[in-house]
Image (tube, grey):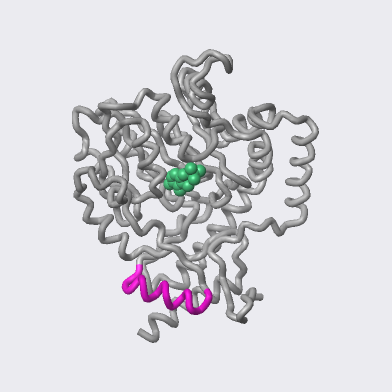
Amino acid sequence: MLSKTHSGETTVRYRNLAVEDEAFRSRLVSVFERVLSHGQLIMGPEVEEFERTVAEYCGTRYSVGVASGTSAIYLALRALGVGPGDEVITTPMSWVATLNGINATGAMPVFADVRGDLNIDPAAVEAAITPKTRAIMPVHYTGRLCDMEAISRIAREHNLLVVEDAAQAMGAELPDGRRAGGFGDAGAFSLNPMKVLFGFGEAGAVTTSDAGVVKTLEALRYLGTENKEVCVDPELNHKIDALQAALLCESFKELARVLVARKNVARSYSQGLRDIVDCPEVPAEGDYSAIFFEYTIQADDRDSLQAYLAERGVETKVRHPILMPDQPAYAHLERPHIPQARRLVERILCLPCHEKLSDDELEFVIGSVKDFYAAA
Ligand SMILES: *Cc1c(COP(=O)(O)O)cnc(C)c1O
């Protein structure tokens, strides 16, 4: 059944963050009770368990829980020694958190254009390298892995660091089993309620296999202190709550199911719409190189399509309508040459794609997109 709004219109919500599964909800409530009982609310045993879980899943030796994905991006770069005087090559297509994280280190962002799959183009990365380049920050946009073979090769040849913005890509993996967060020198995850591995507030994690980087990260996340008292490197507070870490350990148990459900939604969309709009490629059975954090079509007449869907009660998003270098805060940067990103940003539209989307809702969205183009 499709849910109804007050005015009686049919609505398909873009995301639904309510916890509807009773068994899952009661597990979350018992986590609250456990943490309230022991009373160690910041850091603590749950954080260590959460960090072990993330590292094991991502195939890295360590992970460090932090306050948000933005903190994770910033701290990962900073712990690897990236700072003023360095250039970091990244994509123009991401949430501005990527750029703000780079900017906060004092390094200079450099933008390399994207490919048709909305991910950074390795050839453009290579062309953007200068003597000042220190790191590459690929973003696995929409949950689709970047071409990490090519990016890793370029990084090796030019002696550059790779820090993945894997905020949208928990669970994305190559057929050989390597996962997002495990390709580079470090990976940064956001675990906020919108993400595929979802917390119930703000949270993030850095993955790495370098014990020295972990030691630095652990100091940096708490004011740059050693042993929680001696400040050796001034920094702000980026710690993660025990409660959030404990809730995330429960969410982790849902991840495999969520990944399967989202891929099924994506496959249905692509089957239903591929003759009408440009649909993202859905990997074959058993292949999770794209996990559909977003299901992003590329459409002619995008704005009219979005307005038409809104009228029908279908909530969609343009993620993100302003390319990062075009944000007003970065007007002082040199304008990058990014024709693909500029073309694509006018065409992208994200359809509702999540594990709670019902078959009826899915059919309704597909039918509505078809109706729009049939009427056009
Ligand atoms: C969500 C997100 C971030 C930021 O994460 P927060 O936890 O909101 O700070 C960074 N990069 C990308 C690509 C994201 O989607």
Q: Is residue 312 magenta?
A: yes
Decide which of 162, 36 is in the foreground and name it: 36
Q: Is residue 345 above or below residue 36?
A: below
Q: Is residue 311 above or below residue 86?
A: below
Q: Could you say which quadrant of the image residue 322 lies in?
A: bottom left
Left or right side of 351 for 109: left
Decide which of 129, 12 is in the foreground and name it: 12
Instruction: Write the residue at 64% across / 41% down.
Output: 248
Q: Is residue 59 magenta?
A: no
The region drawn magenta spans 299-313
Q: Could you say which quadrant of the image residue 203 lies in?
A: top right
Instruction: Write the residue at 49% across / 21% down.
Output: 224
Q: Find the residue positioned furthest to the bottom.
A: 375
Spot occupied by residue 92 in the image (x, y as percentages of width and height): 30, 48
Spot occupied by residue 338 in the image (x, y as percentages of width and height): 23, 51
Spot occupied by residue 271 in the image (x, y as percentages of width and height): 47, 69
Left or right side of 5 for 307: left
Instruction: Write the residue at 62% across / 81% down.
Output: 8
Q: Could you say which quadrant of the image residue 37 lies in?
A: top right
Do we see residue 249 in this rendering?
A: yes
Rendered-image quadrant of the C terminus: bottom left
Spot occupied by residue 132 in the image (x, y as percentages of width and height): 22, 28
Instruction: Write the residue at 54% across / 52% down.
Output: 194
Count of numbered labels shown in the rendering? 0
Q: Is residue 157 above or below residue 147?
A: above
Left or right side of 361 for 216: left
Decide which of 46, 169 is in the foreground and name it: 46
Report the predominant secondary structure element of the magenta stretch: helix
Do we see residue 169 in this rendering?
A: no
Rendered-image quadrant of the N terminus: bottom right
